Every structure is written in structure tokens, then in C-alpha cells.
Amino acid sequence: QVQLVESGGGLVQPGGSLRLSCAASGSSFSISAMGWYRQVPGKKREFVAIITSGGITNYADSVKGRFTISRDNAKNTVYLQMNGLKSEDTAVYYCNARVVVGLGSFVSWGQGSQVTVSS
């Protein structure tokens, strides 16, 4: 069993910054890619950013230049630094990870963190 635990959400004014963290815990596993998605009520969960174990990153066009994804492989933790936040960034943010166990793999999700951008 591998669990992802998120932290760092909250309320911020437009133009402000927040940093989300997501730590994986368990035993006998490794993680390849880690990423962030977000979802607003009534809409599909959408891709935000992803980072491979080698540090290659990719972003949704809507967040490029404002958000930065990073990871600490030793801590099995992924971060999302969000700058220049806009009201349209308001959503529940979910981290996910491609977990490798033995010869197989699966995707694990965090519990979600509410990010609200409002004045």
C-alpha cells in the first residue's frame, strides 16, 4: 500500500503564491512520474503538471510560466509552486504518482487540497 498525503492548500489573493506538497509513504516501492491535476465542481479533472524521475517536466498551457513542479526523490515528495495565482486557478488540486512495485505499476492519488484564489 502506498499513500500520497498532500499539504499546503488554502486561501490566497489574486497575484499571490502557494506551494503544495505531496509525500508518498509505504514500503518496497519506487516512483516514476509524479504530477498534479485539478478539478472544479461539475468539470473533469484536468492536467496541471508532471515531472519524471529524471526531472523532465511538462505543464498545461494555462499554468506555464506561473507554476513550477519539482520533486525530492530521496523523500518521495513532489511540490507545486504556484505564483501569480488567478481566480480561475481555484480548484481542488490532486497529486498523483506512478508507483512501481516489483514488475508492476499503478497510479496512486492524493486526497486533494483546496486552493481558493479570491480577494
Image (cartoon, rainbow, N blue to C red):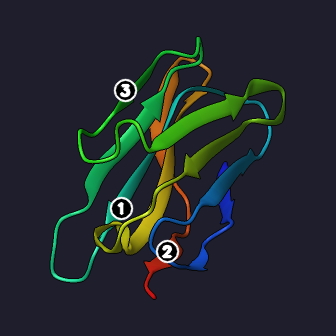
From the image, state whether disc 2 or disc 1 is nearer to you.
Answer: 2
Q: Is residue 90 left or right of residue 73?
A: left
| C-alpha span from label 2 to label 1 | 9 Å
Task: Provide the secondary structure element on which disc 2 rests.
Answer: strand
The total number of labels drawn is: 3
Q: Residue at x 67, y 32 (%)?
A: 71
Q: Which residue is mark 3?
A: 58
The residue positioned farthest toward the bottom in the image shown: 119
| C-alpha span from label 3 to label 2 | 21 Å
Q: Is residue 114 left or right of residue 9?
A: left
The crowd level at tag 1 (other Cα within 10 Å; few <14, some 14-19, many 20+) is: many
Task: Provide the secondary structure element on which disc 3 rests.
Answer: strand
- Chain-order first, disc 2 or disc 1: 1
Q: Residue at x 43, y 33 (%)?
A: 50
Q: Is residue 22 left or right of residue 32?
A: right
Q: Disc 2 residue type?
A: Val
Of residues 4 and 45, the one drawn nearer to the viewer in this rendering: 45
The residue positioned farthest toward the top in the image shown: 54
Q: Which residue is mark 2?
A: 115
Q: Which mark is residue 114?
A: none
Q: Disc 3 residue type?
A: Asn
Q: Is residue 1 visible?
A: no
Asked if the residue at tag 1 contacts the one at tag 3, i.e. Cβ–Cβ closer than 8 Å, the answer is: no
- Above/below status of 89 relative to 108: below
Of residues 82 and 73, the one drawn nearer to the viewer in this rendering: 82
Q: Residue at x 40, y 39 (%)?
A: 49
The crowd level at tag 2 (other Cα within 10 Å; few <14, some 14-19, many 20+) is: many
